[in-house]
Image (tube, rainbow, N blue to C red):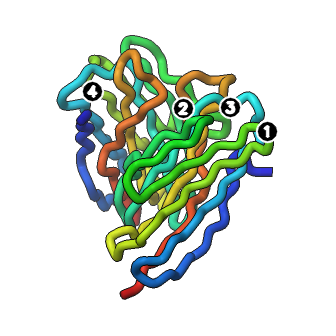
Amino acid sequence: RKEVEQDPGPFNVPEGATVAFNCTYSNSASQSFFWYRQDCRKEPKLLMSVYSSGNEDGRFTAQLNRASQYISLLIRDSKLSDSATYLCVVNPRDSSYKLIFGSGTRLLVRP
Amino acid sequence: GAVVSQHPSWVICKSGTSVKIECRSLDFQATTMFWYRQFPKQSLMLMATSNEGSKATYEQGVEKDKFLINHASLTLSTLTVTSAHPEDSSFYICSASVTGAKNIQYFGAGTRLSVL
């Protein structure tokens, strides 16, 4: 079983749609969680950290369910510029600095 | 925000040659830098953790004699792919964490290596 699992997609949605991505992680002791965005042939860029209480940044909302070891990202009012691969990233407790990346979920927003 | 510069962005080399990739933190000091590799349509895989002034920590399955890492200063880490072969062709990305905020990593733009 992969340490971080994501649905690869692609999710093909029209502009303005709401789309949700899910991610599960296997290490119950994991302590930090992130969503990164990666455009084609580019480096990953931090989209947002994910907190247990849930957090929102504009059109983006992240949720964490520690009991189910589940992380989600909700994008409202999708824009064409949101088209990218979204990476679920986990920092396991057993290593303070290491990040484990999911394989990513690809989003395509069409006009 | 923290800026990480990676150079070169693209390199093509012949099989058997060595290639050096540089990773610099431009506006902050990075005690720890990380080297990742990403094959097409796959996720980033951590290769090694580079610590300033000490030996790098390699992930299981990564040959330390093939992927030489040097982190001689708080702003520069280098990855040398020695005797590169076509199977080493990949996207290599470095990241650096701000001292005191190690969970946040800032990424370089990556180096696309093609070995002929």
Describe the element under mark 3 as helix, strand or loop. loop
Marks 3 and 4 sit apart, C-alpha to C-alpha, by 29 Å
Q: Are marks 1 and 2 on the same chain?
A: no
- Residue identified by numbered label 1: A67
Image position of B28 with respect to B22: above or below: above
Q: Residue at x 74, y 28 (%)?
A: A29
Task: For the N terminus of chain B, give its image quadrant.
Answer: top left
Describe the element under mark 4 as helix, strand or loop. strand
Q: Which mark is nearer the camera, 3 or 4?
A: 3
Q: Mark 1: which amino acid?
A: Ala
Marks 1 and 4 sit apart, C-alpha to C-alpha, by 40 Å
Q: Mark 4: which amino acid?
A: Leu
Residue B11 on image: x %, y %: 29, 57
Describe the element under mark 1 as helix, strand or loop. loop
Determine which of the numbered discs, if any, sits on residue B76 in the image.
Answer: 4
Q: Is residue A79 left or right of residue B85?
A: left
Q: Check the residue under mark 4 and report the chain it is in.
A: B
- Residue identified by numbered label 3: A30
Q: Nearer the viewer, residue B51 or A90?
A: A90
Q: Which mark is nearer the camera, 4 or 2?
A: 4
Task: Tell me, yes or no, if residue A106 can be seen here.
Answer: yes
Q: Which mark is nearer the camera, 3 or 2?
A: 3
Q: Quadrant of residue A90?
A: top right
Nearest to N terminus: mark 4 or mark 2: 2
Q: Mark 3: which amino acid?
A: Ser
Q: Quadrant of residue B35?
A: top left
Q: Are marks 4 and 2 on the same chain?
A: yes
Q: Mark 2: which amino acid?
A: Lys
Please identify the residue farthest to the left as the structure is shown. Answer: B27
- Residue identified by numbered label 2: B64
